[in-house]
Image: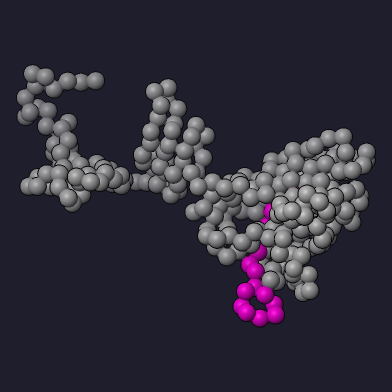
Amino acid sequence: MGSLANKSPANTYKSLLKVADETNGVSTSVSRIEDGEGTATCAVISDDNLGIQPQNDDSTSAFYVRANSGSYLCRVDTSNILFKVGSTLTPANTQILEFHARNLTPVAGTHYFVSKPSSSYTTTATTELANGTSTDPDTSYDGSTTTDDLLCNLFIAPINLTVDAVKFMVSTDSDTDTIINVHLYKFTMTNAGGTDDGNLTGGTLLAHGQATAVDRSVIKTVDCTIDSSAVSAGEVIACFVENETNTDTIMLQTQVLYHFD
């Protein structure tokens, strides 16, 4: 690191830092920190505030703190509007959403809603609601008189969020190997104050994954492929499971890692 010892200010002023307000200096109002020739930095300061705002370009590390070893403790990403923490640089507002299936008895090739954890998960199987027999689940669902059962299978986004990762664990109750497919969807849910409230439309695939050779002697763990990550406030998220092979009962846990935008 250099030293200013025995050097004239006329030769070193460019390396000196000052505030832009050369009349008042540091005061109650924020002032941009500049070098000696007036080139602005990303920092502003007052007697009570210190701020960072990029001058030219946003970046993934506009501000960061590292341990002596070099490991990150936190990092501000102004490109993606994220505050990340820890050695994994995980968004600070990360949450985990879970869906569970206990003793779900399917028809082969049919997609079923998977419920969110509740007291019923620990005692009995929840009501099985089917939603399509194509490669992917249907993109709409008319709950009709089953909306009370549908409710336990939905998560409504309170604010805009981003899905970062989806993982599931699955097993069955038979020795026969099966193929299990899992899909995560988002929907628009009708909420207009009428008899259609609770119906789902505009289904969009968020993530999907497949486990092969699933039987009762194994627990298969799968990291899903993320197909679309953005979920808007008021949209609902649903998880679906399909036994592609037979009617063997399904045990499933799905974890959705997401952060608020």
Left or right, 111 with respect to 208, comes to right
**Which percent across, then down, holds residue 46?**
20, 46
Query: Which quarter of the figure has residue 64?
Result: top left
Residue that appears at 77% across and 55% down: 120
238 w.r.t. 46: above or below: below
In this rendering, position of residue 216 left or right of residue 186 = right
| Image coords of residue 82 (percent x, y) | 45, 46
Residue at the outermost right position: 175
Image x and y of residue 78, in percent: 40, 47
Q: Is residue 127 visible?
A: yes
> 133 or 166, which lies in front?
166
Labels in figure, total? 0
In the rendered image, residue 60, in percent from the top left (x then y), is placed at 42, 41
Q: Which of 10 and 160 lies nearest the eye of the viewer?
A: 160
Task: Name the residue at 78% across, 46% down.
Answer: 252
Q: Which residue sits at x=52%, y=58%?
A: 160
User: Is 166 colored magenta in this rendering?
Assistant: no
Q: Which residues are magenta?
A: 180-197
Residue 181 colored magenta? yes
In the image, residue 140 above or below residue 193? above
